[in-house]
Image: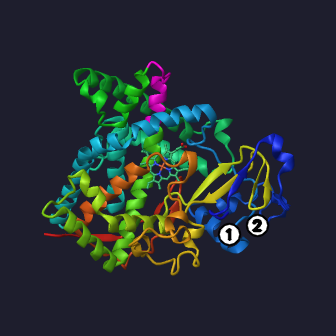
């Protein structure tokens, strides 16, 4: 389905008045097989590419059979509204700004480690380390805890979060939700991990409350999401329980690891494959950071337009969330097609218009310049109105500002300290879709800049 289609959502009483010329049955679409429908085409790590190719084959709106979606971000109605308030408050600009020095410290730790690895004549495992850093940062802000997975990946909390993420990913593409009827050993292990993560976060909440007693100024000026959520839960008008704090801390960690780690990994791959673009970015970073090897000043975050553009272009070409699975809450009409309540639809965030040659000429090329304008572009020419890597509307990603700052801190540190060389002998990088879409590898060699 194309992203510029407007969804007209109406009440059930108005359903009789909906105007359309076709129903889902009339739509073109790939042939499925009995019982499994199109699910077998959707298995594995390339289902987002399949969906994207179907747009070219069948047009902006097409039909698929027997597909199930569910997952952590499907809370609805009043419950969602309440939880959402906690998360957006916990990820406010002030909290992110207060967390900025910690994010810098964590990034510096990774850069130092990479320098030591290179000095020993060894190769840096970029894929592993970028994920470890994203985990350190998101656990740091969401739970107020320094895991330090960059230096050591034996922490039980890391193991438990990993186990949860793997289960979520495999359930997201499972043929049948068997776990509602019986549990396999992997499910029992994931349940145990969920329990352990919950206990750890409850303990961290207790410790954070203690720290806030010692340092009452943290109430006015929280330095992480957990502190901000604790303050919100103490408001007599609110009825947030500790369980709400736990679920939202975990939801943010789930939403914030692979999305940012994959985005940065893709960006490094694309920059290494486009050395001229990488040089332009390095020049911008050098000019802004001066003698410093890392960004330490919040104000510098506003001075990196080319980095911003390179990030937007990365999201267009290699989004970690290229499609959203949505469920119609009422009978509605989309693109002149009647969709009944409960129907699951996949909407491209970036892989619709973002990969359309008429919207983005030479669409396969990585060109950050597409996102740079002397004057604000006209509505029709504004690329930001054609792709939506962070979704849109009420459920717009609440972590987007954190992600944008994280990308800037981490990528500017990499470009300031290292040169990138793409390993042309490595096997081609594949797009791998689990819960989020990431590269199969980051075959990039780093060289320390003196
Ligand atoms: C480059 C990084 C990121 C991308 C591309 C991304 C993308 C998205 C998208 C497309 C959605 C669905 C929005 C919609 O339904 O319209 C979403 C939701 C969400 N994201 Fe992100 N995200 C990123 C980073 C983060 C981070 C760092 C966090 C946590 C701190 C986070 C937490 C969430 C949460 C909790 C939701 C669910 C919101 C709701 O249902 O109300 N995301 N994200």
Judging by the rendered image, the residue that carries numbered circle 1 is: 54
Q: Can the viewer see residue 260?
A: yes
**249 magenta-colored:** yes
Q: Is residue 423 above or below residue 162?
A: below
**Some atom of ligand 1 lies within 8 Å of the CB belonging to the residue at label 2:** no
The answer to which image quadrant residue 30 occupies is bottom right
Taking 406 as reference, is 433 left or right?
right
At 61% from the left and 36% from the top, the residue drawn is 183
Query: Tag on residue 179?
Result: none
Residue ranking furthest to the top: 236
Badge 2 element: loop
At 32% from the left and 78% from the top, the residue drawn is 275
Which residue is nearer to you in this view: 250 or 172?
A: 250
Query: In the rendered image, which quarter contains the N terminus?
Result: bottom right
- Ranked by sequence position, the earlier of labels 1 and 2 is 2
At 32% from the left and 62% from the top, the residue drawn is 126
Taking 76 as reference, is 37 left or right?
right
The answer to which image quadrant residue 337 occupies is bottom right
Measured as percent of width and height from the top left, residue 238 is found at: 48, 23
Measured as percent of width and height from the top left, residue 435 is found at: 53, 52
Judging by the rendered image, the residue that carries numbered circle 2 is: 29
Binning the other alpha carbons within 10 Å of mark 1 as few (below 14), some (14 to 19) or many (20 upward) gives some
Measured as percent of width and height from the top left, residue 446 is found at: 25, 69
Q: Can the viewer see residue 124?
A: no
């Amino acid at each position: 389905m194309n992203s510029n289609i407007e969804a007209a959502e109406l009440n059930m009483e108005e359903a009789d008045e909906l105007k359309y010329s076709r129903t889902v049955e009339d739509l073109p679409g790939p042939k499925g097989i009995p019982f499994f429908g199109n699910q077998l085409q959707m298995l594995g790590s390339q289902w987002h590419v399949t969906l994207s190719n179907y747009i070219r084959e069948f047009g902006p709106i097409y039909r698929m059979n027997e597909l199930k979606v569910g997952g952590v971000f499907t809370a609805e109605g009043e419950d969602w509204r309440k939880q959402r308030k906690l998360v957006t408050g916990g990820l406010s600009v002030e909290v992110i700004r207060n967390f900025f020095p910690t994010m810098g410290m964590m990034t510096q730790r990774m850069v130092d480690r990479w320098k030591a690895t290179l000095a020993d004549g060894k190769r840096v495992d970029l894929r592993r380390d970028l994920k470890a850093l994203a985990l350190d940062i998101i656990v740091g802000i969401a739970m107020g805890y320094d895991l330090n997975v960059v230096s050591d990946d034996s922490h039980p909390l890391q193991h438990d979060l990993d186990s949860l993420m793997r289960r979520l990913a495999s359930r997201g593409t499972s043929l049948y939700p068997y776990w509602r009827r019986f549990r396999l050993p992997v499910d029992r292990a994931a349940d145990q991990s969920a329990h352990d993560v919950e206990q750890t976060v409850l303990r961290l909440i207790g410790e954070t409350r203690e720290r806030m007693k010692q340092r009452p100024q943290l109430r006015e000026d929280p330095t992480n999401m957990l502190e901000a959520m604790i303050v919100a839960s103490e408001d007599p008008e609110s009825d947030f329980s500790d369980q709400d704090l736990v679920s939202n801390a975990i939801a943010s960690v789930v939403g914030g690891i692979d999305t940012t780690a994959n985005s940065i990994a893709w960006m490094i791959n694309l920059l290494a494959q486009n050395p001229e673009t990488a040089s332009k970015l390095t020049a911008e970073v050098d000019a802004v950071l001066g003698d410093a090897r890392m960004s330490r000043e919040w104000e510098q975050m506003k001075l990196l337009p080319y980095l911003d553009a390179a990030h937007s272009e990365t999201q267009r070409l290699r989004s970690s969330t290229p499609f959203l699975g949505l469920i119609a809450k009422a009978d509605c009409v989309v693109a002149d097609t009647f969709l009944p309540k409960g129907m699951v639809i996949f909407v491209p965030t970036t892989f619709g218009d973002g990969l359309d040659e008429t919207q983005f000429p030479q669409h396969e090329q990585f060109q950050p310049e597409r996102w740079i304008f002397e004057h604000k572009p006209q509505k029709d020419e504004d690329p930001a109105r054609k792709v939506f890597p962070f979704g849109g509307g009420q459920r717009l990603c609440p972590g987007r500002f954190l992600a944008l700052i994280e990308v800037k801190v981490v990528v500017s540190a990499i470009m300031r300290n290292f040169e990138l060389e793409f390993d042309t002998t490595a096997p081609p990088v594949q797009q791998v879709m689990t819960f989020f879409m990431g590269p199969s590898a980051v075959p990039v060699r780093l060289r320390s800049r003196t």
